[in-house]
Amino acid sequence: MKKQITTALFAVATFAIAASAHAADGEAIVKKARCVACHTVDAKRVGPAYKEVAAKYKGDAKAPGMLFEKVRHGGSGNWGNVPMIPHGEDKISNDDLHEAIKWILSLH
């Protein structure tokens, strides 16, 4: 019994560390890609706050793909009149963009 409890606690601790690392990675990616020039976690800047994005798309299974396309190709109308410019792979890799979107959507 003691071994099972120790194993379960280890699994929980490992998950917590992995989630923390994931969050740090996503935050580092948006900073490196300079997304923070237009977005912050908590407040609208040029574009919506990341927490607003997470709240709007909470539970929407299509959100990661849609947001990926929105960042890649740009667009307007979802958050006001200021268009989001397209951000190609020269600005943020596909893998980093997917990781950043996961992080943003986790901020609800």
Image: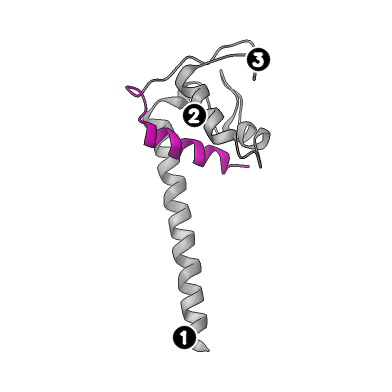
Q: Residue at x 47, y 86 (%)?
A: 3
Asked if 105 appears above or below 36 in the picture, the reply is below
The furthest residue to the bottom: 1
Q: Residue furthest left?
A: 90
Q: Secondary structure at mark 2?
A: helix
Which residue appears at 53% of the width and 32% of the height? 65
Mark 3, secondary structure of its residue: loop
Amino acid type at image mark 3? Gly
Residue 101 is inside the magenta segment: yes
Q: Which residues are magenta?
A: 89-108
Which of the marked residues, 1 or 2, is nearer the chain's N terminus? 1
| Marks 1 and 3, the one that precedes in the sequence | 1
Picture quadrant where residue 79 is located: top right
Residue at left 53%, top 37%? 104
The image quadrant of residue 27 is top left
Q: Position of residue 71 (x, y in %)?
A: 48, 23
Image marks 1 and 2: residues in contact by CB distance under 8 Å? no
Q: Amino acid at mark 2?
A: Phe
Mark 3 or mark 2, earlier in chain: 2
The label shown at residue 68 is: 2
Residue 37's spot in the image, x, y percent? 46, 22
Disc marking residue 80: 3
User: Element under label 1?
Assistant: helix
The local crowd at label 3, few if under 14, some if 14 to 19, many if 20 or more residues have their Cα within 10 Å, is few
Check if residue 32 falls in the magenta segment. Answer: no
Residue pictured at 57% horizontal, 21% vertical:
47
- Main secondary structure found in the magenta portion: helix
42 vs 56, nearest the viewer: 56
Marking on residue 3: 1
Disc 3 from disc 2: Cα separation: 19 Å
In the depicted structure, whether residue 17 falls above or below residue 100: below
Q: CA distance from mark 1 to mark 2?
A: 44 Å
